[in-house]
Amino acid sequence: MLTDLSKIPTYDTLGVQERVERFQKRSIKKSSKTEGLRKILSMIDLTTLEGKDTRGKVEQLCYKAMHPHDALPELPTVAAICVYPSMVGVAKNALKGSSIHVASVATAFPSGQSSLKVKLDDTRFAVNEGADEVDMVISRGKFLSGDYNFVFDEIAAVKEACGKAHLKVILETGELETLDNVRKASEIAIQSGADFIKTSTGKIQPAATLPVTYVMLDTIKDHYLKTGKMIGMKPAGGISTSKLALNYLVMLNEVLGEKWMNKNYFRFGASSLANDVLMQLVKSETGFYQSANYFSKD
Amino acid sequence: MSRLNINKTYKLYIGGKFPRTESGRYYPVYNKKGSLIANMCLASRKDFRNAVVAARKAQGSWAGVSALNKGQILYRIAEMLEGRRDQFIEELILQGSTKKEAETEVDLSIDRLVYYAGWSDKYQQFFSTVNPVSSAHFNFTAMEPTGIVSAVAPEQQGLLGLVSVIAPVIVGGNSIVILASEGKALSAISFSEVLNSSDVPGGVVNILTGKKEELIPHIASHMDVNAMIYCGDDQNKIKSIQELASNNVKRTIIYKKSSWNDSNNESPYFIEKTLEAKTTWHPVKV
């Protein structure tokens, strides 16, 4: 059952912005930077979610996931590949023998404007194809019109349809208007059984931002203090530079602490971030600024 | 009634914007008598990196601008510079030139821009060739921009040297990141204001001020830079530039001249230095 949402904390937007600015002022250099970059690489959900995705594109992405940059020894692989349900089988096959997960978006992604039956079928299809993780979208229209129980029930139903697969719930914060709404949606998602909460589909601007992620991390923290259960976090969309990703790590560490600093509890949904991280890693190795020309396409 | 002078804050020119250096550092520039005339941004390697990102972003579409339009834009720079002739003369005098030297330098800079503006729709015909081959092919060579050019401007002639390096590079469709003369840096930044009001797309020309010693290793080694121009005769620097540039087989161009006044400093061959020749074999009916 959904708890009384009138009792949850509210946020002062300016206060959150100030707090977030402080995370961007930490100086991370040399070996700690390298360590952070490797961590970021291991947390990436390498994503391709386009209508024009082909078998070839997905297979190439899977290869990239397993071999980020062979010139650098002992690099971690990314955490998962994130694709549409129709590509799950292809990705699963291409990643055979590796520990990289296959995540699939589902539930009429990205708008979520369909019937519950279609959404559940979509989810079951992805899971049957072999998805280890399911990224669902919430019904923002229902949420904004105050039908919280509908949203709650829908997530719970999808969770059930997921079976063993992990469920990430996309709030699409770019459409939620206020930070208080983000908090409310996070509460609903967590209470209805989400393993991860995720900011965005990547199809709506703004996508992930530091303030929104902060509020979601804060919700996770409160939930942990109350119940002892750890929920994961996935900012997605618009995080394309190493510097910004490091800011997210700083925030993660300062809000939730070291227990969350691994791919089981934190992911970056991104496509071009991986190459930027690799370029930075090679830069710190060689001392020379790098060019995208010398890295495989992502 | 007396009023306070409003002194200009000299900043960098990156991606069509005027940011301060991200490092927050400055270095003083003095006139001949030893009094302070300006604090210049002491650009860091990160400023250089940001400038290269801006240059890369701008280069593709700049290369696609028609030859006629590129010529118009270069001519427009000359027009804008002409309109601010007096200001530039005054600034050069402030940096130690005599009145006559300053006038010559500004006039030559304007004329040089016009010179290269004229070459914009002509160099391609000048350098391209149709090559005789013994198979059933139409074989021709056409010129393409090298890409991103990094440059260290001449230490003397802070305006004319800078303009003489920039103009042939951009008329060829390249974008450029140039480190201005250390001691005569004021004109370079004032020139960026001219560029900014001349329809030159942001990022095509990026101007930094700072220390050669600190920045040259990065200017020479950056893997995303396709060619480098060094103006000067420091043998140690030239050697280290050539070594570092070899990492990504960067074209290196060295100008040892100390004066850019003579007309032998204008030539289409300056454009050709940052062009690449592409040869195409086109099958023809036997």
Image (spheres, coloured by chain):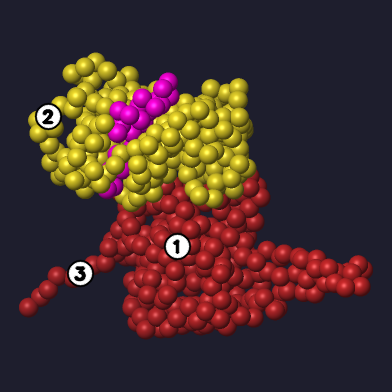
Chain colours: A yellow, B red
Q: Is residue B169 magenta?
A: no
Res A143 label? none
Find residue B118 and report its horizontal and vertical position in percent.
Answer: 57, 83
Q: Which residue is mark 1?
A: B203
Chain letter of mark 2 equals A
Residue shown at 45% from the left, 81% from the top: B76
Which quadrant holds residue B14? bottom left
Q: How many residues crowd around disc 2 within 10 Å: few (fewer than 14), some, or many (20 or more)?
A: few
Q: Nearer the viewer, mark 3 or mark 1?
A: 1
Q: Is residue B46 left or right of residue A140?
A: right
Q: Is residue A8 above or below residue A270?
A: above
Q: Which residue is mark 2?
A: A4
Residue shown at 40% from the left, 39% from the top: A118
Find residue A214 and report its horizontal and vertical position in percent.
Answer: 25, 35
Q: Is residue A170 magenta?
A: yes
Give the residues in magenta: A154-175
Q: Which residue is mark 3?
A: B6
Q: Which one is nearer the viewer's eye here, B234 or B67?
A: B67
Under circle 1, the secondary element is loop
Q: Is residue A62 left or right of residue A49?
A: right
**N-term-proximal mark, 3 vs 1:** 3
Q: Which one is nearer the viewer's eye here, B241 or B232?
A: B241
Q: Marks 2 and 3, Cα distance to the nearest angstrom?
A: 61 Å
Residue shown at 73% from the left, 74% from the top: B128
Callouts 2 and 3 in the same chain: no
Which quadrant holds residue B182? bottom left
Q: Is residue B242 above or below residue A181?
A: below
Under circle 3, the secondary element is loop
Q: Which one is nearer the viewer's eye here, A117 or A144?
A: A117
The residue under label 1 is which amino acid type? Gly
Callouts 3 and 1 in the same chain: yes
